[in-house]
Image (tube, rainbow, N blue to C red):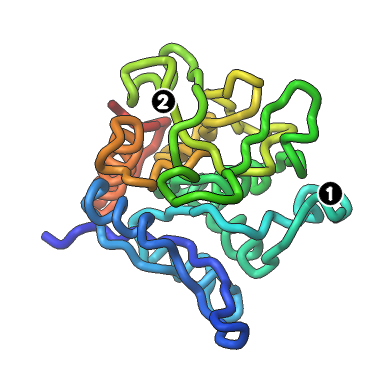
Amino acid sequence: MSRPVIGIIGNYHVINGRYPTHAGGTMNSEAISQVSDCIPVILPADPTYVGVGELLDLCDGVLLTGGRPNVHPEEYGEAATEAHGEFDRNRDAVALGLVRACVERGQPIFGICRGFQEMNVAMGGTLWPEIRDLPGRMNHRMPPDGTLEEQFAIRHRVTVSAGGPFARLFGATEVMTNTLHGQGIKEPGMRVVVDGVADDGTAEAAYIEGAPGFTLAVQWHPEWRAAEDEVSRALFRAFGDAARAWAAGARPGRLTQAAG
């Protein structure tokens, strides 16, 4: 039996200042292949080339990755400012539709960093443009210098709800994670349950209440050396299990968040 296919949302890049690409970090593909035990496929995040329905037919699950451009604030009814940073409207057009379709169908979807924010916006939520500017919040951005090991190092605690899907996966209500983001959830979208927070109150883990399938999302980056980290392994294994069930024809009819 072939492994399930996981579509990894691609990010737009221009290489050498002139060559346009849709690309994905190898650490995402590694986590999907080695920990989820699925086939990673990079999806071009541009509605010129692909439609949401086509992607759903192609994939058994969708991974919404991090990315430097942010969700455009017009998607949640606000005007763009310098603090909102760079944008990728094409990715917005694909990713937000994928979230809503996966939630409705029960098709597995896993959001990471920008993907965490996309899942909130897709459900009608809003975002803070810069977490570190808020009173009492720490700087959640990655260090600007240093090695990848230093930038992706474990830096803060996340506390999740006792008895919730993340606590069931982790076997604990407190875990340690990395942090490499500037924006964050302001108002949760409809049915978006913030199930984990950092010590400063920043939303770090969420799921869609009542969704028939896997709809977990985290603000940190579990794809970094996922096979070596207990928390990351739990997330990617659960995602892989959900994709295998979908590939085998299971169509959940009730909440089945991360049975673990």
Residue 74 position within the rendered picture, expressed as x and y whole percent measured from the top left: 81, 55
Q: Which residue appears at 54% of the width and 80% of the height?
A: 15
- Tag 1 and tag 2, C-beta contact below 8 Å: no
The amino acid type of the residue labelled 2 equals Phe
Distance from disc 1 to disc 2, alpha carbons, whole Å, reads 30 Å
The amino acid type of the residue labelled 1 equals Gly
Residue 259 position within the rendered picture, expressed as x and y whole percent measured from the top left: 31, 28
Q: Which of 247 and 199 is in front in this view?
A: 199
Helix, strand or loop at label 2? It is helix
Answer with left or right where residue 257 lies relative to residue 16.
left
Q: Which of 180 and 50 is in front in this view?
A: 180
Quadrant location of the C terminus? top left
Nearer the observer, disc 1 or disc 2? 2
Q: Quadrant of residue 8?
A: bottom left
Vertical comparison of 164 with 141: above or below: above
Residue 133 position within the rendered picture, expressed as x and y whole percent measured from the top left: 79, 35
Q: Which residue appears at 71% of the width and 62% of the height?
A: 87
Circle 2 residues within 10 Å: few <14, some 14–19, many ≥20? many
Q: In this view of the protein, can residue 125 be seen by the observer?
A: yes
Residue 184 position within the rendered picture, expressed as x and y whole percent measured from the top left: 67, 38
Vertical comparison of 61 with 188: above or below: below
Answer with left or right where residue 82 lies relative to residue 229.
right
Q: Which of marks 1 and 2 is nearer the N terminus?
A: 1
Q: Which residue appears at 68% of the width and 28% of the height?
A: 138
Q: Quadrant of residue 192?
A: top right
Q: In which quarter of the image is residue 59?
A: bottom left
Answer with left or right where residue 259 lies relative to residue 214.
left
Q: Indicate which disc residue 166 carries.
A: 2
Q: In this view of the protein, can residue 242 be seen by the observer?
A: no
Q: Indicate which disc residue 77 carries.
A: 1
